[in-house]
Amino acid sequence: MAITIKEHAVVDGFIKEKDNIKLNELKNEALEQLSEIELLKLTGLKVNLTKKQIELIVELLVKIEAYEQRKGWLFRTKRRTELLMKYT
């Protein structure tokens, strides 16, 4: 299930109101959650998050990385695809 425009706006607003330290903490939390998902998938255990929740984590991570690296839509598209293929 794709992320809606409203959810994109929420993620964008969430990122814009945070300072760099908070963004780094959010990025680390997202990476930690994704590594837990990967570990659960590798061990054959059920992931306790819905696909939509995983997509939102990926979207948050992608937008933070793009903001930090001053990258645009092409970077976000490639990175989002890479992460979604890996974690969903």
Image: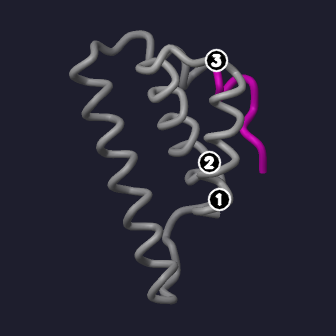
Q: Position of residue 27 (x, y in %)?
A: 35, 37
Q: Disc 2 residue type?
A: Glu
- Quadrant location of residue 62? top right
- Against 25, residue 22 (above or below) is above
Circle nearer the N terminus (3, 1): 1
Q: Disc 3 residue type?
A: Gly
Q: Residues within 10 Å of mark 3 (few under 14, many from 20)?
A: few
Q: Is residue 65 left or right of residue 51?
A: left
Residue at the disc numbered 1? 51
Q: Which residues are magenta?
A: 1-8
Q: Quadrant of the C terminus?
A: bottom right
Circle nearer the N terminus (2, 3): 2
Q: Tell me, yes or no, whether the two marked residues, 1 and 2, touch with CB atoms within 8 Å.
A: yes
Residue at the disc numbered 2? 55
Q: Disc 1 residue type?
A: Lys
Q: Position of residue 76 (x, y in %)?
A: 64, 30
- Against 53, residue 25 (above or below) is above
Q: Residues within 10 Å of mark 2 (few under 14, many from 20)?
A: some
Residue 62: mark in rendering: none
Q: Observer-nearest residue: 64 or 50?
A: 64
- Against 77, residue 11 (above or below) is above
Q: Is residue 69 visible?
A: yes
Q: Residue furthest left?
A: 21
Numbered disc in front, either 3 or 1: 3
